[in-house]
Image (spheres, helix red, strand yellow):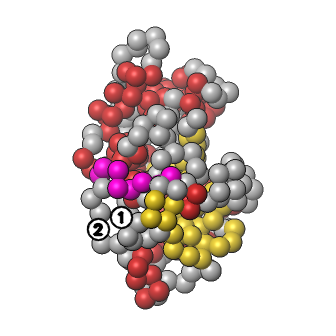
Amino acid sequence: MATLPNPLPRLASLGLELPPGALVDATDGGPWHEPLLWLADDRAVPGARAALQQSAPAAGLLPVVLDVGAGHGGPEEWELIPGETSYPGDHDAEEVLEELWDECAEDGADWPGLAAVRPLAADADPESVASAVVDSLLDGGGPLKDPRLALVPARRSADIPAAIGWMGPANHENDVARLCSVLRSWEDRFGIRVVALGFDQLTVSVAAPPATLAEAEAVAAEHFAFCPDNLLQGADTTLAAYAEHQLLDQPVWHFWWD
């Protein structure tokens, strides 16, 4: 993956106020010549992301929560392979989604195209929404078992999975940068931010979620291509049901790959 200079080797000199933690430079995918991320030692607390979001991006680092308690250990035990990850900007989001849709749609339905842009409300700041979502997750809601604050060298939130060579969707897509191109598109159209990663799970905040059922159904098609297990192995197995129950006015999207 094409990257900017990694500031993690200079972390101690960046002036960031961090809780106790350590750099991760070796995972199940192998050792790396530079650290992939910084990971806090203790469970994240509400307000932690918001505090780091004020200072870390200027240093080329973005905060994200990693779930180390879902039965797969922490990132040291995950198969992170940034050396085999391409660059998200080299892929077209709609082309990626259409290709994945064609692979997954069992009824031969044509790809419906991208959902329309959802304008941000005047008071809907994506970073503020992201921090509020993280705080709600850290208060015990949602799927996180043992959330730890992390810093990743990335300029865009959508690029966080690619920056660490995350292999969570490997059974669906081997090059996570292709999915990150979709996340970039969702950043632009819906104000999403990548707020949490687990071994095979991804959570994003949504500053401008679909507000009508028609809008939600259009987004549901994208979700099916992006993560078919959300529907194939979820409670809502049709696009219409998924749109109504999981997407309509919802500020959080959660993805899980088997």
Please, what is the three-letter code of the amino acid marked with disc 1? Arg
1 sits to left or right of 32: left
Callout 2 touching callout 1 (CB < 8 Å): yes
How far from the left and from the top, in percent, is residue 11?
45, 81
Residues shaded magenta: 79-87
Check the image and report above or below for 188 versus 54. above
Label 2 belongs to which residue? 4
Mark 1 residue element: loop
Mark 2 vs 1, N-terminal side? 2
How far from the left and from the top, in percent, is residue 233?
62, 27
85 magenta-colored? yes
The answer to whether one can see residue 187 in this image is yes
Label 1 belongs to which residue? 155
Please, what is the three-letter code of the amino acid marked with disc 2? Leu
Check the image and report above or below for 99 versus 53. above
Instruction: Using a 10 Å C-alpha cutoff, classify the residue at mark 1 as few (fewer than 14 neighbours), some (14 to 19) or many (20 or more).
Output: some
At 61% from the left and 22% from the top, the residue drawn is 237
Mark 2 residue element: loop
Check the image and report above or below for 169 versus 216. below
